[in-house]
Image (cartoon, coloured by chain):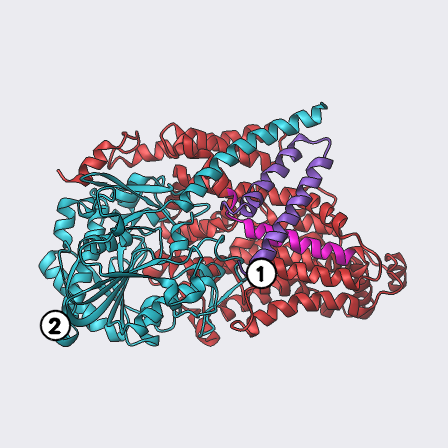
Amino acid sequence: MPFIMILYYIICVYLISMVVWNFIREKKNPEYFFHYLLVLIPLILRVLRVK
Amino acid sequence: MSREWMIKIVLIVLLAAGTTLAGIQLFRQRHFDVPMVAGPGVTRTAKLSDYSPGLKGTMADTTVFFLEGNEEGGKALIMANTHSNEPASLLAALIFLENAVVEKGTLIIIPQFNNSGGRNTRPGDGYPLYFEIPTDWGSKKFRLGNRDASPLDQWPDPDVYIHYPDKQLLSFIDVRNTNRTWPGRADGPLMEQVTFGAMEIMRQENVDIAFDIHGAETMFPVTNCIVAPEKSARMATMASLTVKAREGFDNHVEPSPSGFRGLSHREIGDYSDTLPFLLEAPIPFLDQPTGPKTEKFLLDGKDPFLLKLAKAKMLFVPYDESGWPMDKRVGQHCSVVLEIMRQYSRKKPERAIEVSHVPRYAQVVQNGTGSYYHDPSKADPDKVFLN
Amino acid sequence: MNVSEKRFLDYPEIQYVKWGQVENMYAQIGIIAFVMVIAYTVAKWKKLSVETSMFAAALAGGIAGAFVKTPPIGQLARHMVEGAFTYLDVMLVFSTATIFMAVISEFGGVDYVVRGTIKTFYNKRILALLILMFIILIPGALTGAGSVSVLVVGAPTVMALRYLGIPEKKVAAILFIVAGLSAAAPPVNIWAMMLCAGTAIPYVGFELPLAVPVLLLGTFTMLFLGWKREEKKELADILNQMPEVPKKMSWWRIALPFFVFFGLVAAVRIWPFSLPIIGLPLQFMVATLAAFLVSPKKVNLLVISRDTIKRLLPLLTTIVVVGMLQQVMTATGVRGLISFAVISTPLVLLFISLAIIIPFSEGVLTYGAAAIIGIPLIWFLDSIGFHATVAIAGLTLLWPLGDGLPPTALIGRLSVMVSEHKGSYWSFLKNTWVPWIVITITGILMVVFSSKLEFLVRWSM
């Protein structure tokens, strides 16, 4: 895998960790729980090299 | 457990279930291999990476089939699935691969030219993942791929694609489009390496004529035609007139614009001695104003919206209740390829390419595309190639 | 009977396929579209957010479609998830660009730039306005994304405009309109590029057809909304009111991260065949690291990133959901019906209705709208003698306006967020109406008189 592509996977993992961090910290709004999870879908499947 | 975490866990479970199901379907599509049975004419195979080493070990590598005649002659190259959402190209190339017998010269076939694109899907466009072609022994299943290579194989996209070597600015998405990355580079982005591999085949093997087979929307002016640069135009015109007169279908000639870079019909001619021809057959499935994108629509090309637009004279092809069935499109491609090879052989007898056992338009329409495919489960395993 | 005929007979009969009866298809797709609208309305009525309501519309549309196997129910999850990928790269650009600006802002860079601009240009108002216009135009013109303009230079320009005595509601309007124009400005106009890619028209000759209207309309917008100094303040008072900047702050500390970013963008253009493709997200990340390293005070990159993602959540969710919506609309035929309806409209009516169709389609589908409506429209206009390049340029002036319209309102919401506009969204949008209409008329006239304006294309080449 080219070096720059690896960096993009690292960017994705970084963003995933930020989203998950916010998801855990979010206490009140159930809609936000849902939104964080929706945002995770493409990021996680990309990191898993599914799509 | 707190209420907060109860809600979170329920949401995680629901979304994870849906995502896992979808993920498995998408993963399987990417890794689904289409068996191709090498016909009696196939004498050897190679990989595209043999000509463009950077492709080795990537999903962009693909099989190249050589059908060499007993007698020396010219060479023709057929490339299909440059855009993997235009599948009549692949189906026509497989008819050649599984049936053709070459008496004179050599036929080189790359049935899945943009292999990465064939293993990609098109987000936002709601395609089915597969389509099936009925055969005498059951149905043959194919992936329905995308116009562009998968970002799993080539990522990231630039903010704008700068075409090599002309520096023309193209859409960022075209960096993954193997009909914009010609003539390519050995060390460029992966799709430039794909087109470079094909250029190398043409240069190293002294290919005389090259076919890049496509499909185009009925609302697109450049459809149902042969696109040819100046050096191929005469031969294309002869072929167009002949199929019209002898076989009764239209396939006009469109000039290859010299100001639009990266296309096969432009760059192949400019960067090698090969004469390029890009074949377009109508594919209503790709038009925007249509009903749902179903497998049936992909195959029969029937759409009431397009019918209404045809009556308002907004389509560039004749269109009636019979739609534009796949067999018709595949048959056209077979006939046009055969006819251009015949025209070339007449003009340059010492470089003739003589091919038999390939059906023409009327036969494909009458018998169905699938009747020309062989059952891989009954074929000699050495002759079955997965791609 | 040949095998193909056998095959088609084997298909389960789908209700709408009563060949030739267009009305059946209309009715079926119309019902699905109606279900989507109802789902959206009910969700909004239940006080759910725009994003959740759009998700509800997509899901409901998919389920309604599944009754007639468009799409089959077993494929619904796949369509939703696949759709979520439509704008993944845009999501990465948004996230990384905002993290970059958040770091600059955190170390006091924004305050420092605004202080400098106000000090120098306070008494040269027109010059100040035009300089600020160029500052907003450049990032969007280079990247093709108006959102990048808002995210990268929005905060300092907003502050500068505020200190020039422009009320906050007009500031948000200026930012939105000019950032929208920046997306249409050459060299990178993503709508035009997508249309060119879809219509097989080369992306050449767009420089003047895009630059001339963008500069004229941008100047008009700046002067119209920013001419009047509505809140007179003394320069000394303004400078006193401004936030303190860290003592070690200097111009080079701010310039360097931007230099790194624009340097990378420029380098890839200047040496396209020597450098690898880096892509905007990585360019922003490298610039973020540069900003982090030259920061005059200690900044916590992790906390800034976390808070940025939290702030961006509505937009990131919108990008994901709009892809899902687009995919379901195509799989069910709703998208095709919209496209069909647009291009079936009589020509004169079509030109007039472009004013509404184009922005609203962008509001619902963002870039997807260019493909659905733009591609067949350009083919059609081209075939009846309009000049495709100028017509595309004209249309692409209208699309950015849609980025202010719900449900997505991407640039509009970013503008409101960055300018910290306190009133309702509509109160912000109301302030854009004059430039909005002028831009609309300009865009439509460019389409209508595209053949007469063909010289702009010639002069560009």
- Figure check: C360 above or below B105: above
The residue carrying mark 1 is A4
Determine which quarter of the picture holds residue C161.
bottom right
Density class for disc 2 (Cα within 10 Å; few <14, some 14-19, many ≥20) is few
Q: Which residues are magenta?
A: C84-105
- Among the chains, which one is cyan? B
* Residue C139 visible in image: yes
User: Quick one: C291 or B323, which is closer to the camera?
Assistant: C291
What amino acid is labelled 2 in the image? Answer: Arg
User: Does the magenta run of residues contain C96?
Assistant: yes
Q: What colour do you see for chain A?
A: purple
Label 1 is placed on what type of residue? Ile
C-alpha distance separating marks 1 and 2: 51 Å
Q: Is the residue B34 above or below the residue C397 in the image?
A: above
Image coords of residue B53 (percent x, y): 42, 66
Please, which residue is most extreme toward the left here? B246
Report in which chain the residue with disc 1 lies: A
Instruction: Please give the name of the residue rendered at 77% of the width and 65% of the height, measured from the top-left corner.
Output: C254
Q: Is residue C433 visible?
A: no
Quadrant where the image shows the N terminus of chain C: top left
Foreground residue among C156 and C386: C156
Left or right: C213 in relation to C450: right
Q: Does residue B132 appear left or right of residue C101 in this picture?
A: left
Mark drawn on residue B346? 2
Please identify, in this view, whether the residue under mark 1 or under mark 2 is nearer the observer. Answer: 1
